[in-house]
Image (tube, helix red, strand yellow):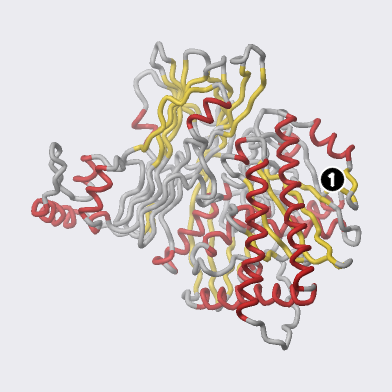
Amino acid sequence: MARTSRLRHEGKRTVKSKAKSKARPKSKAALDPITFSVILNRFNTIANEMTLTMEKTAWTSVIALARDFSCAIYDAKARQICMMDALPIHTNSLHVVLQEIARVFGDDIHDGDVIACNHAYSGNTHIGDFVTACPVFHKGKHMFWTVTKGHQLDVGAFVPSSVPAPAENIWQEGLQLPPIKFYDKGKRCDDVIRMYIANMRWQEWLNGDLMAQLGSIWNGRRRLVEFAEEYGNDEIERYSEGILDYADKRMSEEIRAMPDGDYDGVSWLDSNGKGGTNIQIGARVSIRGDKVHIDFSNSAPQVPSANNSSYGVMQAAAGIPILCSIDPTIPHNDGCLRHITADAPVGSVCNAAYPASTALATVGPGDTMQEAVWKALAHAVPERVLGGNGKDGNLPMLSGTDSRSGVDIEWGCLFFNGGPAGGATSKADGWPLIMTSAGMGGLKILSVELCELLYPMRIDRQEIAADSMGHGKYHGGPGVDVKMTPTSGAMLCELFGEGQSNPPFGAMNGTPGIGGGSYRENIRSGKRIYYSSKGRMVIEDGEFWAGISSGGGGYGDPLQRDPEAVLESLIGGFLSLKSTREVYGVVVDAKTMALNIEKTKALRKKLRAARKSKAITTPNVPGYATWVKKSLRSGDEYLIDAQ
């Protein structure tokens, strides 16, 4: 309750950025480079073992198969030491909730404790992300924290979803857990855990995921204690500080190489969850010396649904594009994070005021804030940015009753198979199935075979969507065309995404992705009902759900793409003959698929003369996508935020 009161008080002013950690004075003794490398990689190995433990023991497909979770190691001051194969939206903000956990419990932190939290107003990302933190002691001294964050299949919301788009406040989101002990000095708090599980749907699955998270942090604790036994507390602390200093120094050099200045980017949320459209998010990126500050003041007020950002997501979303723009060999730890600050007015869509719902924070405003920062960076360091990433418009939460075995069993599934793609860079095409900027390729889709085995559905189609990406010298990754039919009665489909109306942007004369969309279709009549990126639909017997996700934004002028690369994309099904000719100016024989170089040169010369507009990013206006409008047929409907 103290945290809630404090946050309510903070709602009267602008909350500033992450508190900077005060580094200890450096030891005079030099660090041995070999020992430094061994210790750095030992931390990474432990974090990787934590990750594998969670992946291999979780019960729900969202964690075990889709891998919507992250594991990391922090020192006793809640400074990130390392993370491995994690989701950026998690690990770029875990320190915020861990600092709150440390503040709440103060001196009441002991060996054997496990502290949990899913409360967005306690520094967490959103209610769907469940944090478990374990302090690690050695010889009576608090040395580290092992931390996991896993996206839960259910949170006890008023609808069967851990990302309930229509929630208007935190109480409609589900069970709120500010920092609370699940284990106290090694003793299981059975009453607290029973209370938690009792509020969940699919309780056996959720209990299994909880055990997986506990196993992960306990495995990390065991390995860190062995580590400290081998090297001793003082030496481990000295090299830990050196690891942070190393990242600090290299991060400083990276930012100093960027031109000082103020750079602006604007993006838009598709809707406010209640029918209002094109909600602005504006980012000003200020680079000074070796510091970057991101200001989201040029953004809309908070919205009356769950499509608001928490403070933790705002911090993560501000920093992710910066961290993606540096040398990837730099360890992503507190040494990097201390160079990035961010703020947004409390009560804005980027930093909601209690008790507004933030259930969509990570993938709604979170992805869109990142997009605004990327667009700003395109003016500062165009060679380091990418085209826009697709957002999660076709990753629905599905649920229903499975009667295939003769017994009615309630089921739920976060269906990631319609995942969008990533944007192109100045050197390469975009990745397919990046899923969201929040995950940056760290999420997976479920295999068709496992989907149909685990859940009462038939995957009728799952294939590349041609021409779904933005075009350029390097094109975005392709989107996905998915069709799915329920096989055991009606299926509830909760949509919670973004990017359908406001597609992934193109960079440096590249074009945007298509945006995409989804609909349900009656098999007999052929009538389709299209839904906006948020909404609820019931797929009845005799109907199917279909979604086409957006490809990522392109980078550079399409007329500069190597004709051989255009031909390869055409043969691979990424491009159509029409776009090959009209967008890329490449002439290919439709029958033989042979490339005509001379005709290509002539056509490109003609197209180049006609194309005069140049843009750093495109589009820079809201509601740009036209895929739904072009796809609607006579008699079809289009519903915005339908519930």
Q: In the displayed structure, does residue 586 sit left or right of residue 69?
A: left
What residue do we see at 37% from left, 60% from top? 616
Residue type marked 1: Phe
What residue do we see at 25% from left, 53% from top? 565
Residue 14 in view here? no
Please determine whether, in this image, residue 353 is positioned above or below residue 545: below
Please determine whether, in this image, residue 474 is positioned above or below residue 240: above
Per the image, the residue denoted by label 1 is 182
Residue 632 in percent (x, y) is at 37, 26
| Residue found farthest to the left | 598
Please determine whether, in this image, residue 304 is positioned above or below residue 28: above
Residue 326 in percent (x, y) is at 50, 68
The part of the image, by quadrant, that contains residue 319 is bottom right
Q: In the displayed structure, does residue 550 sit left or right of residue 533?
A: left
What residue do we see at 70% from left, 72% from top? 240
Residue 44 in percent (x, y) is at 63, 62
Residue 399 in percent (x, y) is at 61, 25
